[in-house]
Amino acid sequence: MWGTPSLTDLQHQSLLPYLSQTEESRSLSLPPALAKRYLAGRFYARKLASEILQQDWQNITPAAQCAVCGGDHGAISIRGSDLNVSVAYSGDHAVAFAAHGRKVGIDIESGHPSEERQVGILHSTTSITLQGWCDYEAVVKADGRGILIDFSDVEISERDGEKYGQVRGSAEIYAFIPLEAPAGVVVSAVIETLPG
Ligand SMILES: [Zn+2]
């Protein structure tokens, strides 16, 4: 589900009464611009889950527990269901992506897939494509540890025309799901594959 990283006043006001306590504390801990974006993400997580679960969005409670600070952000699960949701933002776009019972991760970046970007790996930097960066982010977001995982520890492979990602030392294998993106946006989305 695609949207923009800032909600309309109407959307914002409609969301406020339904925020969980942890969402409220997370949004209060952020600078205003980031808080807006965070709330937009939680709004889309609710809307998407509401469509999938066929429930009013007001009854949907997304929750996450950051691997670093324990705060309510990062990989989202929907309370009372097996639905997992990932949200991402870049420029004028926001996106939410979900699956039942499997970890999911999505990342978007503004630009062209083959555009180069410098990233730090251990004590040096290397140049990778924007698509490569999105692929990395989608996998580490699904994993839950996010950018605590070094870029060089994510292995991307192709098998039978399908693309997969795996964090070195982890059992989970993630399959990349091709998604349409708005013009000027690079997207990567992954779903955990089931063993066997
Ligand atoms: Zn955190």
Image (cartoon, rainbow, N blue to C red):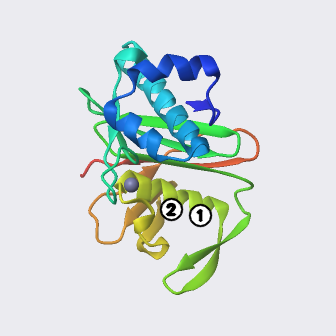
Is residue 116 at least partly visible in the picture? yes
Q: Quick one: SS at disc 2?
A: helix
Of the pair 174 and 52, the residue shown nearer to us: 52
The picture places residue 143, in percent across and down from the top left corner, at 35, 56
The residue that mark 1 highlights is: 132
Q: Residues within 10 Å of mark 2 (few under 14, many from 20)?
A: many
Label 2 sits on residue: 136
Relative to 121, say whether 63 is above or below: above
Q: Amino acid at mark 1?
A: Gly
Whether pointer 1 and pointer 2 mark residues with C-beta atoms closer than 8 Å, the reply is yes
Q: What residue appears at the point 51 percent right and 34 percent down from the top-left corner?
A: 39
- Percent across and percent down for residue 38 are 51, 39
Residue in the picture at 42% in, 17% down: 57
Residue 145 falls in which quadrant of the image? bottom left
- Is residue 77 depicted above or below 109 in this figure? above
Disc 2 residue type (three-letter): Tyr
Disc 1 crowd rating (10 Å Cα; few below 14, some 14-19, many 20+) is: some
Q: Can residue 86 be seen at all in this image of the molecule?
A: no
Q: CA distance from mark 1 to mark 2?
A: 6 Å
- Vertical relation: 10 (above or below) 21: above
Is label 2 within 8 A of ligand 1 (CB to nearest ligand atom)?
no
The residue drawn where x is 40% and y is 25% is 49
- Work out whether 141 lies above or below 104: below
Name the quarter showing ligand 1.
Answer: bottom left
| Identity of the residue drawn at 74% across and 55% down | 112
The answer to whether residue 92 is left or right of residue 50 is right
Q: Secondary structure at mark 1?
A: helix
Left or right of 134 on screen, residue 146: left
